[in-house]
Image: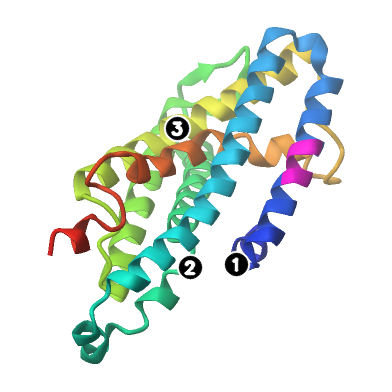
Amino acid sequence: MVLAAVFAPPIVFVIVLILAGVVALAELFALRRAGVVAVAAGALVVVGLVALGVLRLATLYASALLGGLIPNSARAGGVSSWPYTLEIPYALVMVLFATWAADIFAYVGGSLLGRHKIAPSISPGKTWEGTLIGFAAATSVFLFMQQLFGNWYAFPLTAFHVDVAVAIAIGPAGFAGDLLESLVKRRAGVKDSGTFLPGHGGILDRIDSLVATAPLALLPYLVPCCGPTSGMMGS
């Protein structure tokens, strides 16, 4: 469902984000006895969902801009499809898969190798071993997808050192978002943030890591000379 929203028209994606935000904030309001940490989690949800929306719309901006930058000689040389391939929200897809990789590998790694608890009073299942494996997975997946998109579409996504910085930060950011949500639930005395998804908890349980990692994917757009058009502008 998430990927369907990603590849749907931007307005559909924005509507999905708004609905997810409303449900997540309603869940946090129900957990308001958690106090200031619930407020912090609410702020993170808003910032993260806005970042996801901006990432989706930024793809359209890059596509329109680069459509005017590609010379006719380049089009004749076989790259005339660039403006269309850019309709894929690459930055958004990269952060989604990297975040999911961190969660999945942290769980599997912790289940198989976990020995040392990180914060047993907040989230008893989290171990140092699993968490570090998740960090490594997020970094690897993000950089792999950067190379995949870059090689397949001959498109310089960003300066490589910016990609590395974002890739390394994905894991810790997702972990912090997950831990913050766990703290909210612990202080509120509940196991799940809600019952919106039967058997899987609430919306907040599903997006806690993502809302923390999404703002990082905006970094390549904010660092001067390191955005999507830098490689072409300098050629």
Question: In the image, is residue 12 part of the stretch drawn in magenta?
Answer: no
Asked whether residue 122 appears in the rendered view, the answer is yes
Q: On the image, numbered disc 3 is attached to which residue?
A: 131
Of helix, strand and loop, which one carries label 2?
loop
Q: Which residue is mark 1?
A: 7
Q: Which mark is residue 88?
A: 2
The local crowd at label 2, few if under 14, some if 14 to 19, many if 20 or more residues have their Cα within 10 Å, is some
- The picture places residue 146, in percent across and down from the top left corner, at 32, 58
Name the residue: 45% across, 49% down.
Answer: 98
Residue 19 is one of the magenta-drawn residues: yes
Bounds of the magenta span? 18-22
Furthest residue toward left: 235
**Mark 1 element type:** helix
Distance CA(mark 2)–CA(mark 1)? 7 Å
C-alpha gap between disc 3 and disc 2: 30 Å
Does the magenta stretch mainly form a helix, a strand or a loop?
Answer: helix
Q: Quadrant of residue 155?
A: bottom left
Which amino acid type corresponds to the residue marked 3 in the rendered image?
Thr
Q: Nearer the viewer, mark 3 or mark 2?
A: 2
Q: In front: 88, or 209?
A: 88
User: Closest to the observer: 221 or 162?
Assistant: 221
Residue 1 visible in this rendered orientation of the protein: no
